[in-house]
Amino acid sequence: MPGTVLLLAASPAGKGCLVDAASVLPVLAAVPPAVLSGTDTANVVELADPLEPQAVLTRLRAAAGAPGPLTVFVTGQLQLDRRQRLPHLALARTTPATVRYTGLPWHWIREELRLRAAGSTTLFLDLHADVEAWEWLRGAALDCGRNNAVYGRVAPPPSRRAVAVPTYMKAVATILRSGGRPAPAELHQLALGRVGVDGHADLVLAAPGVGGSVPGGFAPRPPYRPEGPRPQTPDGLGIADRQQSREADNSGADPHSLISAAVQSGRHPDADALAAHQEQLAVRAHGPGSEAAFHWAEVRADLAMFAGDPVRSCRTWLGVAGARLAAGQAADAVAVEAAVDRAHHQWGQVRDAVAARELGASLAELRSRVPGRRQGALDHVQRQLRQLQTQG
């Protein structure tokens, strides 16, 4: 099966630039796609100093939805937004005052990769942090997703008026250009040996995937396994899938892997039934307003998107956002904003005018309460609704 490679190099223009991120792309681009991916063939997507976070999100979402192995190379700088103190990958237009609107929230990367099968995704990171982000990293983890292998480094801010070089990523590219394709962990160690990172203050990232640990305080999120009574196997599954539900319940196997396998093989109803089963477990064990229940509702919204059903996906995301607000979560909470943003995106994919008007009215009401990070989002919904009204 062919692989997919995403090359992302981003840094602000002007005096806010800490690292010459784009300088690594010619070196990476000179590596054959199959070598970058570690597969027989591969598709490569390259993003050099992108301007808009939504554009990056679209490419990331497409790459995450592709079958087969995914390898992501990210070079750039980390900054915190001043409102919620969350890490962002700075883009070309990012300034310290506009990070929230012009940077790529790091949790978007985690969220887009969360439904991929364990062991199918590898990230190589070469990041430089500004002063505030570096202090934040002392006590926080840069969460890249529970199923993903992560290798690389985060470097402290360079000296004043200096622009750093992404030496780790260039070392990775140089090794790959030699023609060999070491395993990711070996490639990581070879690159560190060339950079001499142990002589610097860098935080080294080395997480092989589920259950792995990352030195320097970085750690992948452990898999969530709801507790409580085991209900009957959900209806609508084939014999083989019923046996896999039973096996998951009895062995503690991660249900995300079973769901990912169903999606990859095109068994979308089976995937949704498995997620619905987990959602019922979470509601019974923790309540309808618990993070566990919200998580599985969000998984079902993503599954509807993968199945090509934007109406169901949009409606589910709207429900999640409304439920989070009803549970007392703030309108600018990350999870609330993400739910409304995803509902908005899926609404844009709805082609049935009647469904679009119905969902658009609910979305407009939510957007008035949750404007989100993208300026003009509410105006966009209202303009689209006016156009839909003229269609009769």
Image: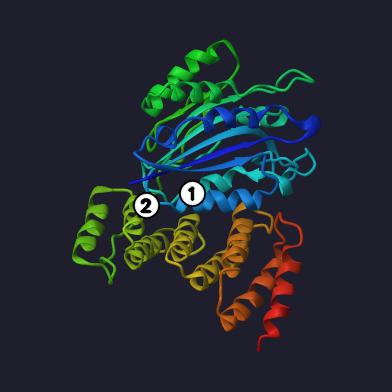
The answer to which of 339 and 285 lies nearer the viewer is 339
Q: Nearer the viewer, residue 314 or 266?
A: 266
Q: Is residue 148 left or right of residue 140?
A: left
Any part of residue 368 in sight: no
Q: Nearer the viewer, residue 112 or 329?
A: 112
Instruction: Specify whether residue 13 is in view.
Output: yes
Near mark 1 (Cα within 10 A), the count class, few <14, some 14-19 or many ≥20, is many
| Disc 2: which residue | 256
Q: Is residue 339 above or below residue 174?
A: below
- Please state, as top left, top right, bottom left or bottom right, where the C terminus lies in the image: bottom right
Q: Residue at x 19, y 65 (%)?
A: 239
Residue for badge 1: 63
Sequence-wise, the earlier of marks 1 and 2 is 1
Residue type at mark 1: give it.
Answer: Ala
* Scheme of image coloration: rainbow
Expressed as whole percent of the image width and height from the top left, the position of residue 78 reads: 65, 34
Is residue 24 depicted above or below 328 in this figure? Answer: above
Q: Residue 197: x, y in percent?
A: 54, 15
The Cα–Cα distance between marks 1 and 2, rounded to whole angstroms, is 19 Å
The amino acid pointed to by label 2 is His
Give the residue drawn at x 36%, y 44%: 118
x%, y% of residue 45? 53, 44
User: Where is residue 389 shown, x and y percent of the image?
Assistant: 69, 84
Q: Is 220 above or below relative to 362?
A: above
Disc 1 secondary structure class: helix
Q: Callout 2: few (<14), some (14-19), or many (20+) C-alpha neighbours within 10 Å?
A: many
